[in-house]
Amino acid sequence: MTEAPKAMTETPDGTFTDDVSTTLEAALNGLQLDGAIFFRSEFTEAWAFASPAAGGEMAHALRPGAERLIMFHIVARGSCWVAGPDGQRHWANEGDVIVLPYGDPYEMGGAEEASSVPIFSLLSPPPWPTLPILRHGEGGDRTDVVCGYLHSSDPLFDPRMRAFSSVFVVRLPEGPAARWLRASIEYALASSSDTSPSDPSSTRLPELLLIEMLRLHLASAPSAEHGWINALRDPALAPALACLHADPERDWTVSELAHRAAVSRSLLDQRFREVLGVSPIRYLTEWRMHIAVELLGSSDLSVGQIARRVGYDSQEAFSRAFKRRMGVAPTTWRATRLVSDTPHP
């Protein structure tokens, strides 16, 4: 297998550069992932299904001892939507990767409306002696999805920290990363029908793919160049970050965050500046913009709805803040992502 392409950082105009920080690179290279399952699904319009959380008995069946699993789906053909616990649909096209970092319950479906059925009415519950192929739908246009489950005990995937959204879509730019992903998908589709869950070929590839997706996604995270992932392990910063990530629309103050973290206001401010290079309130603003970028790139939410999701009372105030951070207005940024090409209902 060829080496995974070098990670790229997204710029305000939607292009990518290869200047991902060494801090982020080192943290992801040290990320421990294991217990992967890799199988394929074939859906035809109209279709929709609901999947429970990848925790408890399900997680233990796939990876003994695991409390929860990371789930991801690669769209190998066609397009689909996915919705996490909040019900908001995120759209993904061919070549996109859907990640559910905390194994939350979700629904998935196609362009045509359909009644959602439980996934285990289509697929036997794990464990699986051989990797299954899930087929579902009414015979219309086809969408192929390659599915994976992985385990990690890293704080990056701790649901209390909520370092990610419940579900997000990674859209690769044309170039080495996209070519590598397509080749990997072809390999996975060719080998998934006759491998077992313990086959090394069905485990190592998902690990490499997920780490590459995280590189691309996290390159735009606030203060990534200052060791953002390591901040999740900091005893003073971790509780404050958990608050900001879980409730970004709240009008937080440094005093409130310091109280939650059980440290002084001055110490918390000092740790933010030392580790992340910004003040707590500046970090909150950047985190809101990070979430806004995700929602603008994959959801049907209007700019006004996104503004409220990330803590702004008016669309105008949000648009001004977004333009200061990203260099362009939200509507312009969304247009550059070609969201209009997505088959929204």
Image (cartoon, rainbow, N blue to C red):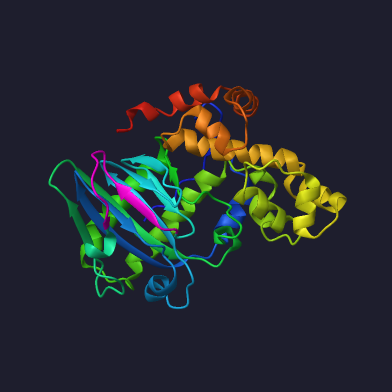
Q: Is residue 282 above or below residue 238?
A: above
Using the rendered view, name the quadrant where residue 150 is placed.
Answer: bottom left
Q: Residue at x 33, y 32 (%)?
A: 342
Is residue 245 shown left or right of residue 44?
A: right
Q: How many marks?
A: 0
Where residue 125 sits in the image (x, y, percent)? 29, 71
Name the residue furthest bottom.
Answer: 64
Q: Is residue 333 above or below residue 171?
A: above
Q: Residue at x 57, y 43 (%)?
A: 219
Where residue 27 sits in the image (x, y, percent)? 61, 56
Is residue 159 shown left or right of residue 91?
A: right
Using the rendered view, name the quadrant where residue 170 is placed.
Answer: top left
Q: Is residue 46 visible?
A: yes
Q: Is residue 89 above or below residue 325?
A: below
Is residue 253 shown left or right of residue 248?
A: right
- On whether residue 260 falls in the magenta region, the answer is no
What's the magenta bit mostly, secondary-structure-wise?
loop
User: Which quadrant is the N terminus positioned in?
Assistant: bottom left
Where residue 18 sits in the image (x, y, percent)? 54, 38
Query: Which region of the structure is painted magenta?
Result: 104-117
Q: Is residue 63 above or below residue 284?
A: below
Where residue 206 sits in the image (x, y, percent)? 39, 59
Q: Is residue 274 visible?
A: no
Is residue 108 shown left or right of residue 315?
A: left
Name the foreground residue: 3 vs 7: 7
Name the foreground residue: 195 vs 12: 12
User: Which quadrant is the C terminus positioned in?
Assistant: top left
